Image (cartoon, rainbow, N blue to C red):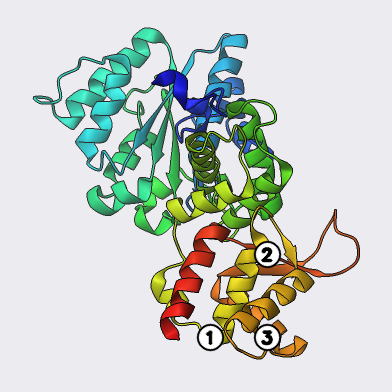
Amino acid sequence: MWESIGKSVFKDQRTLSFDYVPPKLVHRETHMRKLVMLFRPVFEENASQNAMLMGSVGTGKTATAKRFCMDLKEHGEKKQVAIDWTIVNCRQRNSESAVVLQIVNHFQPNFPDRGFSITEMLSILRKDLEKRKIHLVVALDEADVLLKKAGPDIIYKLTRFGEEKVDSRPLVSVILISQKNIFDMIDPASASTFKRTNVVEFGKYTCEELRDIIAQRAELALHEGSVDDDSVDLMAEVSSEWGDARFAIEILEKAGMLADEERQGMINVEHVRGAKAEAYSSITESKLSCLDKHQKLTLLGIARASKGKAYITTKDAESAYSVACEEYDEKPRAHTAFWTLMKDLDTLGVVSAKKSGLGISGKTTVITLLDIPAKVLQQKVSQMLDESI
């Protein structure tokens, strides 16, 4: 049975996991440099430091925090400064006690989950840090969830950790990771430890940046030659609406799985469309059903002309539309009217129409399907047109 499934396109599928952090983060070098500058006092002045990472889902906040902490620990080893780090997902652990327990578990994995107060657990954590003579960086991922449910007390306790003793060295630094601006969610005492200049903002990835991220992960995860440039371009295109690297990586993995399922040995543009439809199917029956007849005929032509291709030209689309009109006894609209039909589909999000770039001579508009394999779309639209006769 196993012999019959063929060779996989994947050489290391683990590198497509959301938990995987690559050795280098593409297009987050500026954010890493800012964190390095912020945390210099940990080495140079034996001080603690705090930072906030804020941005939308899939903008690289958590991966940047992890990569930075890994590099920080490695740099500490070179400088003979003992540094360790831990990250807590505050959506999963959204109470003060649950957060503190997980931090304590970093040094004591078998520490009991009941029977100790927060104050007692923090005291135990302090003793662990003092015994090891180590500085701990605590990253609280999705901190806004914790703040909304439990309030800001835990932030205050962690950022002021160790201040009870006059001669105590700083033991803890804190990184807050959030989709929202959380300054308004913390009290003035806690906010005083987070300067607004310590905020690192993460914008959504551009299409070009997503392409570089996909190319990096493809190199890590796939056998050489298992994906072509058109497929990588299309993955970036279908992900760019959200600027979400997680979504882009999910598309890459699902496309690879579809290629394996079909024993293709290589990812093509149809696998990408299938992966998009499976991961986030924004083309629904209701969206297609709201199209008028000539919009459906335009879409049918585009679907037919797009089979096996990442992009087609306006000329290709109009020619295929004319053929579809003949089949359904409709007079094709003039060129200007066809252009309007195509732009309607673009506005609706069914197709993407944009000016051509490198690799296509002249200035023309190229069209691509974003959400669904051409073959599947052709079947859906043809069925709707047949039922309307």
- Above or below — where is 333 with respect to 304? below
- Above or below — where is 339 with respect to 200? below
- Above or below — where is 352 with respect to 273? below
**Which sits in the foreground, 19 or 378?**
378
Residue 340 is tagged as 3
Instruction: Tell me which residue sits at (27%, 34%) in the image.
Output: 99
**102 to the left or right of 285:** left
**149 to the left or right of 234:** left
Where residue 45 sits: x, y (%)?
58, 23
Dot 2 crowding, Cα within 10 Å, few <14, some 14–19, many 20+: many
**Which sits in the foreground, 48 or 76?**
76
Q: Secondary structure at mark 1?
A: helix
Where residue 89 sits: x, y (%)?
34, 38
Q: Amino acid at mark 3?
A: Thr
Q: Secondary structure at mark 3?
A: helix
Q: CA distance from mark 1 to mark 2?
A: 18 Å
Q: Amino acid at mark 1?
A: Lys
Residue of label 2: 305
Name which of mark 1 and mark 3 comes first in the sequence: 1
**Which sits in the foreground, 273 or 207?**
273
Residue of label 1: 293
Instruction: Tell me which residue sits at (42%, 11%) in the image.
Output: 133
Asked which quadrant contains residue 134, the reply is top left
For the view shown, which residue lies furthest in the right direction?
A: 362
Name which of mark 3 and mark 2 comes first in the sequence: 2
Q: Are marks 1 and 2 in contact (CB under 8 Å)?
A: no
Instruction: Tell me which residue sits at (46%, 68%) in the image.
Output: 380
Where residue 389 sits: x, y (%)?
45, 86
Where residue 70 sits: x, y (%)?
53, 23
Dot 3 crowding, Cα within 10 Å, few <14, some 14–19, many 20+: few
**237 to the left or right of 366:** left
